[in-house]
Structures are given as C-alpha cells and as structure tokens.
Amino acid sequence: MNLTVIDHPLARHYLTILRNKDTEPQQFRAAAKGLAYSLVMEATKRLPLQQIEIETPMEPTVGYAIDNVVAVPVLRAGLGMLDAVLEMIPNVKVGFAGVARNEETAQPQEYYAKLPDLSDASVLICEPMLATGGSLSWAVDKVKGSGAKSITALCVVTAPDGVKKMYEDHPDVQIIAAAHDRELNENFYIVPGLGDMGDRLFGTL
Ligand code: URA
C-alpha cells in the first residue's frame, strides 16, 4: 500500500476543525496550515541528506543539509498547505499545477502549469482532497514529465477510489494523509470529508 495515514493528536485536532461545517474560512486556513505541518514532517522522513562539514564553537563536526525539494500545490486547494511547507523548508522551490474538475464527468482539465526542472528533486505534491484521484494522477504525470522520480503526495483526506487509482497509475508515489474516508458521494465529494476544500479555504461557498 502506498498510503500512510498519520496518527497524531494534533492532526486529529486540526482535521476536526476542518471537518466542522461551522468553521469560518479564517479558522479553516489556520487549521489547514496546522495540519500541513504534521503531513510535511511525515512526508520528509526519508528525504535524502547531504553530509556537510561544519564547525561548532567547540570543534569541527559533521552536519546535514536538505537540498532540492520542490513543492507543487495543485491549484487551488493545495495553496492551503503551501505556507507550512515554505516555513518548514525555507529553501524549497515551488511549482504550480492548475487543474479544474469538470463537475459532470469529474475528469481533470488543466488550466495552468509552471514547473522547474525536477530531475534530481524530491517533489511534494500538495493535493488536499484525493477523491477520484484524477487530479493527483494528472499532477503526477506533469511532474514526471519534468523529470521527477521521487514524488510524495500530501493529502488531508483520501477516499478509496482515489487511492486505488493512484496505486494503478503511479504505484511509485507515496501518499501521506490525515484521514482515509469511507467513500465518494454521487457528486464525487468525499464523505464524511470536509466539503469543497478550495471554497472553504477562500470563502467562495
Ligand atoms: N475536492 C474537494 O474539495 N472535496 C472533496 O470532497 C472532493 C474533491
């Protein structure tokens, strides 16, 4: 299985705020950021490290540096996780992947993509709601097209259909999530889920 569901009290706390239909956009954004810290910690557990020589005030020693991490938020909901990534990995580069879901077919439609060369990068795709998996699979195709080989997806909530699609299309991609929910409804929304993540982040309900 390429899915890891994190189990941490803070993650459950923030996820509950996100799920609550009465949470206002301002609190929702803060909770999304709070939750994203835990997802980033888990997703970066196996990042390659460069060994470097440094000197403490006492003597020379060996240190470690992370290098060449690229975050790719899938627009627009992925932007809700970006601040946490920027704070935790200040030298991160950021690419953007814009995809809209056709509400009738639920198929992904690209409207914007701007990615750096990803050949040697550790790529963190921010796609909070893994519903049908169409958008994430499309985003992974895009980043692989730019050379990416090491790809981790950060999700808030996943659904069985999305995880299955990712396993079929991209079994090499690790998925880190805060919850794996029951199913999709007839409109391809995750249930119990948290509603439309983009609308709730940006107050466009
Ligand atoms: N996108 C969302 O924002 N929410 C869902 O439940 C599914 C897709």
Image (cartoon, rainbow, N blue to C red):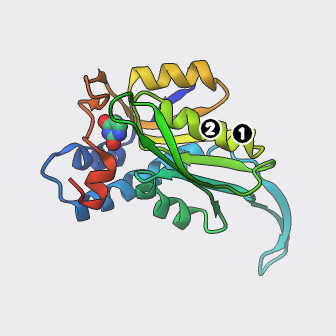
Q: Please tell me which residue is depicted at 56% across the width and 32% down the height of the picture.
A: 137
Where's ligand 1: which quadrant?
A: top left
SS label for mark 1: helix
Q: Is mark 2 within 8 Å of ligand 1?
A: no
* Image coords of residue 126 (percent x, y): 51, 48
Labels 2 and 1 touching (C-beta < 8 A): yes
Rendering quarter of residue 16? top left
Query: CA–CA distance between discs 2 and 1?
Result: 6 Å
Q: Residue flagged by tag 2: what amino acid is it?
A: Val
Q: Which residue is mark 2?
A: 140
Q: Nearer the viewer, residue 142 or 125?
A: 142
Instruction: Return the mark for residue 144.
Output: 1
Q: Position of residue 49 (x, y in %)?
A: 77, 52
Which labelled disc corresponds to residue 23?
Answer: none
Residue that appears at 45% across and 37% down: 177
The answer to whether 47 is drawn above or below residue 137 in the figure is: below
User: Taking 34 as reference, is 109 left or right?
Assistant: right
Q: Secondary structure at mark 2?
A: helix
Q: Is mark 1 within 8 Å of ligand 1?
A: no
Q: Residue at x 40, y 57 (%)?
A: 80
- Check the image and report above or below for 147 versus 166: below
- 143 left or right of 110? right
Q: Quadrant of the N terminus?
A: top right
